[in-house]
Every structure is written in structure tokens, then in C-alpha cells.
Amino acid sequence: MADPRAATPPPPPAQLLPVAVLLWLAGVYLRIPVLVAPPLAPFISAELALSQALTGALTTLPILMLAIGAMPGSLAIARLGPRNTLALAMVIMVIGSAGRGLVPDAPTLLIASAVMGLGVAMMQPALPALLSRWLQPHHLALGSAIYMNGMLMGEFIGAGITLPVLMPLLDNSWRATLLAWSLPALLVAAALFLPRRDLARPLRRSPWLPDWKNPLTLKIGLLLGLSGSLFFGLNAYMGNLLAQQGHFEKLADALFWFNIAQVFASLVMLKMARTWVGRRTFIVLTAALSIAGTLGAVVLTGWWAIASATVMSFAAGILLILLVALPPLLVPAAETGRLSAGTFLVGYTLAFSVPMLGGVLADWTGDVRHAVLLMIGYSLLALPLAFTLDLKKQKGQPED
């Protein structure tokens, strides 16, 4: 039996602005809790006496949780509805993220980081599942671009504002800084209930496990792995790559341009989402450009290598939005959560494991370029999938 709330019309255009603001703020908190860790890592490590591996785990563990937590997110969407799931996930994220500022030792720090990553992972499929309930069909692509702009802005804000702006205002306390970034998310979670739709649990229980028979699950997931492994991997190995080229002094500038390129990508998509989303040509072009830019970062040196890496980041940012926007566009609302969760499960597993395997290869050979070349190799294998994507709206259960 379909949920009677399905007959409730989406909000008129005059009400789109508050919905857009909520989507954007939720998107911001997809990344700020994760990307605030690298700038604070030296201070946390000094106080808690962390090893290099544990210091790195502050960033890599949440990325791994983005894959592991996708399925709990899908289950919660099927049982609680997307809005309730998003609010619950934000509360879990705050408990873990703020908890990092209260921990007494390294083990509890890792536990708190894992809880935070679980919350973020549950948020990811809830947002695209919520779009179908809050927006009219012709606004779905724009809605995806809005929350993805928030996510990519969150990457830049978390990494770029923490040390020069927020931490000095809080007496240079990394604990207070984590609390200050985390607690406002509770206000966003509460504000999610202001739009007058999806207030209660759905009456019909939807399936929640990934539909592996649907080729979109693997194809979109493997292409997300292309985008994620290149972006996270090159971000991770940028310092070693520049050092090997004799240009380590350019690292700060390289990371700035590399990360802000994704912000520019999201701004472009705010303008072009309705034209580009759902078009196979743009997926192929941005995937190919991402690979070419990564290759340029390896074979070129100095500013040319940095410029090539920046192009890769820009293209990968557009590719990410193009792919994440597909589930609410292609499948019924009841299927959106589990398709998104399945693609995130595959994509973030690869975004974590491919760069890690590249690092193992680089340790074995003594050449960091081999880590990047392994990521390029995976991406070349995944690229042909972009040509085979079926981007026609699928028939299925009535939308709820």
C-alpha cells in the first residue's frame, strides 16, 4: 500500500529557498567533520601521543566508515524515512565528532571517529532519497547540485578555515575547535522538520539491501570509485610526489588550488545541473579528463604538475555530482535510498582501498609515482563503464 503522503504536492517555487538552504547545510556537514581532522592532527597527536599510523587514521578511518555505514543508512531510510534518517544520522555524527574533543586517550579517539564516520555515511544516501519528497522532478538535478555544493564547500571550509580563523578564536584549543564545528549541526538536524512533508515513518516498508541485479548499482559505484580514488589518493600523495620532484616548497599552494577546484566545480554545477545531469557524454568527458589530469601530475613537474592536478580535481568534482545525482533521477523514490547506498558502498570502498594499495606498491618500489599510476590503472579499467550507463528512467513501484 502506498504512503498517503505521496499525494501531498511538493512545495511551490516560493518555498524552494528554505529547502535549498537546509539541503546545503546538510551537505556541508557531509565533509566538515571529516576534513577538520588533518589541520588539527598535529595538535591532537602531540597531546595524545599518537603514532604516525594513528594520526593518519583520523582521516582514513572516517573514509572507510563512509563505505561501511552505507547499509545502515539504507536500512534506516526504509524503516524511518529519509528525513528521520538524515536527522538521526546528523545526531550520531555530532556525538562522534564532538566526542573527539572530549576523549582522554587514543582508543576512545578512534571509537569517536568511527561513530562520526558512521553518522556521515548514513547521511549520504538519505539526502538523495529526500530529494524526491521535497522537490518537483524538474528540480531534482538542481537539488543534488545544491547539497553537493555544500559538501564540497565543507571540504574547503573544514580544511581552510580551521587553523587561520576558528582555532585562534578558541584559545588555540583543538578540543574546543572540534566542539565548535560539531554542535551547530544539531540545529540543522532540528530544522529538517520545518518543511511540512515526510514527518512520520513510511507506512510501507521498502527494500533496503542493494539491488545487485540492477547494473546501475555496480556501474555508478565503480565510477564513483574512479572519482574518489583519484581525488583522495592524489590529495594524500601530493606532498611525497612534490618532494620526489624537488618542489616540496609548493605543497601549501598545491593543496589550496587542488581543493578549491572542487568548490569551483560545484559552483559550475549549480548553473549547469539541469543541462548536464543525466547526460552520458558529460560523465565520459569528466572521467577521461580526471584520468588525464592525474597522469599530468605524474609526468609533469612544478607548477605544470600542480595545474594538471587542479584540472583533475575540478573534473572529478563535476563527475562526482553527475554520478550522485543519478539515483533520484533514474529510479522510483522507494528505490533511491538503496541504490544510493549501494553505489556509496562500492565507491568509498574503492576510494579507500585503491590509494591504500597504491601506497603499498610505492613502499615496495620506493617510488611514489607508482601509487598514482595504480590509481590511474584502476580508473582506465572503470572508464568504459561510463559508455554503457543506461540513463533512462526505470519503471517500478509507485513513488512515495
Image: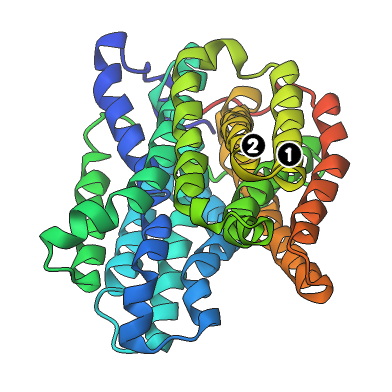
Dot 2 and dot 1 residues touching (CB under 8 Å): yes
- Name the disc covering residue 304, or none: 2
Q: Amino acid at mark 1?
A: Gly
Which residue is at the front of the view, 11 or 244? 244
- Alpha-carbon distance for marks 2 and 1? 8 Å
* Left or right for 237, reference 185: right
Q: From where the camera sits, is residue 377 visible?
A: yes
Circle 2: element type: helix
The residue beneath circle 1 is 296
Q: Position of residue 140 (x, y in %)?
A: 49, 21
Task: Kindly indicate the quadrant of the structure image that contains residue 196.
Answer: top left
Q: Amino acid at mark 2?
A: Trp
Q: From where the camera sits, is residue 207 visible?
A: no
Q: Position of residue 18 (x, y in %)?
A: 24, 25
Residue 175 drawn above or below residue 182: below
Task: Name the residue at 50% across, 35% down.
Answer: 262
Residue 227 drawn above or below residue 371: above
Tell which tag, 2 or 1, sits nearer the viewer. Answer: 2
Task: Name the residue at 34% across, 87% down.
Answer: 48
Q: Position of residue 303 (x, y in %)?
A: 59, 39
* Left or right for 86, reference 118: left
Q: Residues within 10 Å of mark 1 (few under 14, many from 20)?
A: some
Residue 314 drawn above or below residue 142: below
Which residue is at the front of the view, 142 or 189? 142
Q: How is the image coloured?
A: rainbow
Q: Position of residue 318 (x, y in %)?
A: 58, 28
Which residue is at the front of the view, 380 or 373? 373
Circle 1: element type: helix
